Image (cartoon, grey):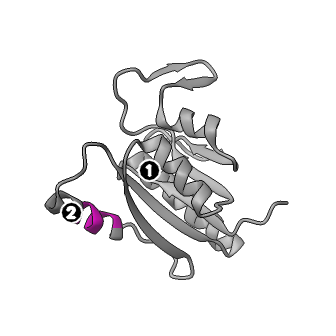
């Protein structure tokens, strides 16, 4: 098994991202890894007052277990490009991200692949494993 020391968790602050974060924290706890929580502010550059609000929102993303080390990063740019850049820069061993969240024009779901989605672009471009986490439907019971 490949040791996991650094997990990158990109977030758009959606419920889908929150579900993926909980899983990332469980993995980090079990592996003794750190979690880097990344939010990417889209272009054009975020005004200073909005950036401060994003930083505060990002800092509120905390692990449920105090033993899990969490770092926060706020970057500016295109989501998939910045996620891949930070993954390489931090030598992350695993990216854990939600598969649903912000969906914009040009993002189409086809059987077996995501065309144009951030998750799909990260899956295709990452140099480490990517865990794309789908949020369970409301009321679904674990099997």
Relative depth, front residue between 69 and 136: 69
- Marking on residue 17: 1
Closer to the N terminus: mark 2 or mark 1? Answer: 1
User: Are there few (<14), some (14-19), or many (20+) residues within 10 Å of tag 1?
Assistant: many
Which residue position is annotated with label 2?
53
Label 1 element class: helix
Please state, as top left, top right, bottom left or bottom right, where the N terminus lies in the image.
bottom right
Quarter in which the C terminus is drawn = top right
The residue located at (57%, 40%) in the rendering is: 122
Residue at the limit of the structure toward the right, as seen here: 1
* Residue density around tag 2, few if under 14, some if 14–19, many if 20 or more, within 10 Å: few
Q: Which residues are magenta?
A: 52-58
Query: As drawn, which residue projects farthest toward the left?
Result: 49
Q: Evaluate whether residue 139 shows in this view.
A: no
Mark 2, secondary structure of its residue = helix
Is residue 125 positioned above or below 70 on the image? above
Which of 10/61 is in front?
10
Where is residue 133 shown, x and y percent of the image? 56, 44
Residue depicted at x 36% and y 37% = 102
Residue 112 in the magenta stretch? The answer is no
Q: Is residue 110 left or right of residue 31?
A: left
Which secondary structure type mostly characterizes the magenta part of the structure?
helix
Q: Residue at x 34, y 64 (%)?
A: 58
Side of 57 relative to 132 (left or right): left
Q: Quadrant of residue 38?
A: bottom left
């Amino acid at each position: 098994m490949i040791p996991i020391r650094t997990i990158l968790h990109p977030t758009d602050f959606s419920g889908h991202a929150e579900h993926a974060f909980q899983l990332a924290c469980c993995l980090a706890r079990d592996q003794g890894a750190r979690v880097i929580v990344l939010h990417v502010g889209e272009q054009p550059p975020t005004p200073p007052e909005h950036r401060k609000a994003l930083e505060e929102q990002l800092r509120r993303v905390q692990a449920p277990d105090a033993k899990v080390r969490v770092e926060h990063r706020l970057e500016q740019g295109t989501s998939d490009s910045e996620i891949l850049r930070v993954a390489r820069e931090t030598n992350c061993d695993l990216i854990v991200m939600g598969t649903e969240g912000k969906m914009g024009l040009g993002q189409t779901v086809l059987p077996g692949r995501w065309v144009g989605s951030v998750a799909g672009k990260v899956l295709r471009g990452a140099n480490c494993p990517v865990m794309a986490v789908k949020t369970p439907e409301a009321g679904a019971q674990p099997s």
